[in-house]
Structures are given as C-alpha cells and as structure tokens.
Amino acid sequence: MKWQQIRELFPDQFVLLSILDYTEQEDKKIVTEVAPIRVIPAQDANKSFFSAEPGSIVYHTSNEECVIHLRKDPLLRVRRG
C-alpha cells in the first residue's frame, strides 16, 4: 500500500508497518510501499518503536510522508565547547 492509503485508513494513529519499498536520497529513506501490521496505542508507541523488527517501523499517520533519517556513523560523537 502507499503511505497515503495508510494515512486514510488509520488517521492520526501510530501504526506498525512492514517496509516493502523505498527510495534513498542522501541521508534519508523515503518509504513508498508498506504493509500495515497493526495499530499501536499511543502509550505503547515508544516501546514498540525500539522493539520493531528489522524491515519494520512504527510511524504516526499525521506525517505527510514516511521518511527515515539515516545516520552515517551513529557512534560518532561531537564534542562541543
């Protein structure tokens, strides 16, 4: 399904999605095809986000696009000051 279809079926909700297709642009993945797995209650969204299986994501349907921002080196720390 397209992201817009998910937004229409599950308005203003967190949804666990299986990512079927995406395009990659520099530091982000723009998800183009998904399969809904289930609605996630708001109080469980954070826990579900961090326990999602690879290839799945918890995302809120208030977002116009389903975009995953990538970190090139997540272990790199920037020292300030």
Image (cartoon, rainbow, N blue to C red):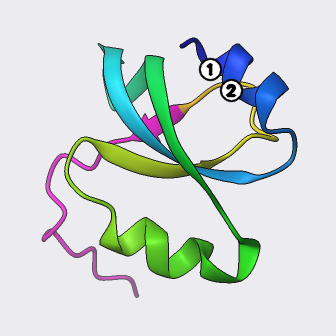
The disc labelled 1 sits on which kind of residue? Trp
The structure residue drawn at horizontal position 22% and vertical position 75%, both measured from the top left corner, is 77
Assign the C terminus to one quadrant of the image. bottom left
Image-based side of 70 in relation to 34, left or right: left
Crowding near the residue tagged with mark 2, few <14, some 14–19, many ≥20 C-alpha atoms within 10 Å: some
Residue furthest to the front: 38
**Residue 21 location, quadrant:** top left
Q: Residue at x 19, y 50 (%)?
A: 54
User: What are the residue bounds of the magenta stretch?
Assistant: 67-81
Which residue is outermost to the bottom? 81
Q: Do callouts 1 and 2 mark residues in contact (Cβ within 8 Å)?
A: yes
Main structural element of the magenta stretch: helix, strand or loop?
A: loop
Is residue 12 within the magenta segment? Answer: no
Determine whether, in the image, residue 22 is placed left or right of residue 12: left
Q: Residue at x 78, y 38 (%)?
A: 10
In the structure shown, which secondary structural element does the residue marked by tag 1 occupy? Answer: helix
Which residue is painted at 46% across and 72% down in the image? Answer: 48
Instruction: Identify residue for label 2.
Output: 6
Inspect the image, locate mark 2, and give the three-letter code of the amino acid beneath it: Ile
Q: Secondary structure at mark 2?
A: helix
Quarter residue 49 falls in: bottom left
Q: Quadrant of residue 76?
A: bottom left
Q: Which mark is residue 3?
A: 1
